[in-house]
Image (tube, rainbow, N blue to C red):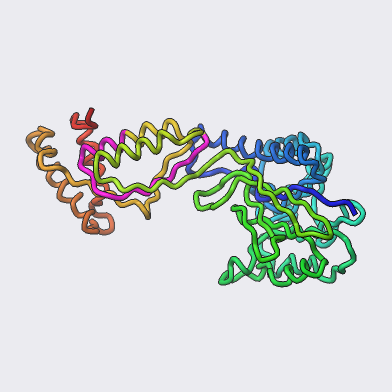
Amino acid sequence: MAPLRFVHTADWQLGMTRHFLDADAQPRYTAARTDAVRRTGQLARERDAEFVLVCGDVFESNAVGPRVVARALEALADGGVPVYLLPGNHDPLDASSVLRSPEVRSAPGVHVLDTPGPHEVRPGVELVAAPWTSKRPLSDLVAQAVAGLPADGTLRVVAGHGAVDALSPDRDDPARIALAPLEEALADGRLHYVALGDRHSTTRVGPSGAVWYAGSPEVTDRREVDPGNVLVVELDSSSPAKVEPVRVGTWAFPLVRAELDSDESLAALRERLTAMPAKDRTVVTLSLTGTLTLAQKAELDDLLEAQRHLFAGVQEWERHTDLVVLPADAELSDLGLGGWADGAVAELAELAGRADHGGSGGVGGPDPVVARDALALLHRLAGGGPRA
């Protein structure tokens, strides 16, 4: 039997929006997700793949608009390679399913894996589908789809979606995918590869090397370890599966940690942000800790304001950000405000100092962090910084 080569991908979630992207960045992010689909088709054609297998969550929801669907289908058509779509938890095959729409059903080369069990690709090659028909299945859909399959020499690829028990042992979910029976089926030749979706980081699961999450082809969250890939898979009946991750994504969501306590540390942060490539496709999450003077805090604020014009997004990870502003000895008096303003500055300084000791104004009371930021802003408005 001829070997099989195909592209495994998942979690396109076309139509996705991100709350941290503004009106400038969100359309570019939306276009990038469709472009990743187009690059996946091009890769399949370049590698002589027989098909592209999408293991769930093709669309962000069943309520996506017709424009999202039309552009997705056009991107799929550009590849010129058959595409198999598995319904997942975002786009289950319920009564409102976008995968039931006439546009999808009539698209050339597009096949919806809408029934559980084997689907013949060609003689001797089957896709064993475990489609979601609701958002909350009450059993292991993959186990049901593969039950009773024989070891008869047929090359079989499972198309599944959801959490695997080996990676989520404490998760109370009746639909968790049991890994051990799949590994047994792989060992005795009933199955040859298990293609999964739901996990957005490219992940190998289990000892066989034949159970994989492809991950999302474009990053969706800073917590993802290895997103932005698709998998080129080669199978034959006499050797282990060959799996090659190939990057198709162009966006990045890096986490930047920095301890700020001096002019030098601020300069190092500036250099680090300046050196990052492709800023228009990068969302930076900051985890900043340390102690700054008013002038240094003003310099930081100016730096971040400038970078927000360059990056697709700059946001602070609030639970892991702990910056304290302690005015240097002469900073408050050097403001030279005089009169009642001096009294207000003194009150702000006293309140801001409580942030260094975990203080709080209580529910609805004065906030030390707000006082800190107010002092820094006052320093900037009064002409105290940033320094040349």
Chain part drawn in magenta: 281-302
Quadrant in the picture for the N terminus: bottom right
| Percent of width and height locating residue 7 | 74, 47
**Can see residue 278?**
yes
Residue at the extreme right: 123
Depicted 88 relative to depicted 262: above or below? below
| The image quarter in which residue 170 lies | bottom right
Q: What residue is rendered at 78% in x and 38% in y? A: 45
Q: What residue is rendered at 77% in x and 51% in y? A: 234
Quadrant in the picture for the C terminus: top left
| Percent of width and height locating residue 252 | 52, 42
Residue at the extreme front: 239
| Percent of width and height locating residue 321 | 34, 51
**Can see residue 66?**
no
Lateral position of residue 12 relative to residue 367, left or right: right
Depicted 109 relative to depicted 353: above or below? above
- Which of these two is toward me, 241 or 51? 241
Q: Is residue 146 magenta?
A: no
| The image quarter in which residue 268 lies | top left
Lateral position of residue 243 relative to residue 116, left or right: left
Q: What residue is rendered at 35% in x and 36% in y? A: 270
Q: Is residue 290 magenta?
A: yes
Lateral position of residue 356 relative to residue 206, left or right: left
| Percent of width and height locating residue 204 | 64, 59
- Which of these two is toward me, 162 or 347? 162
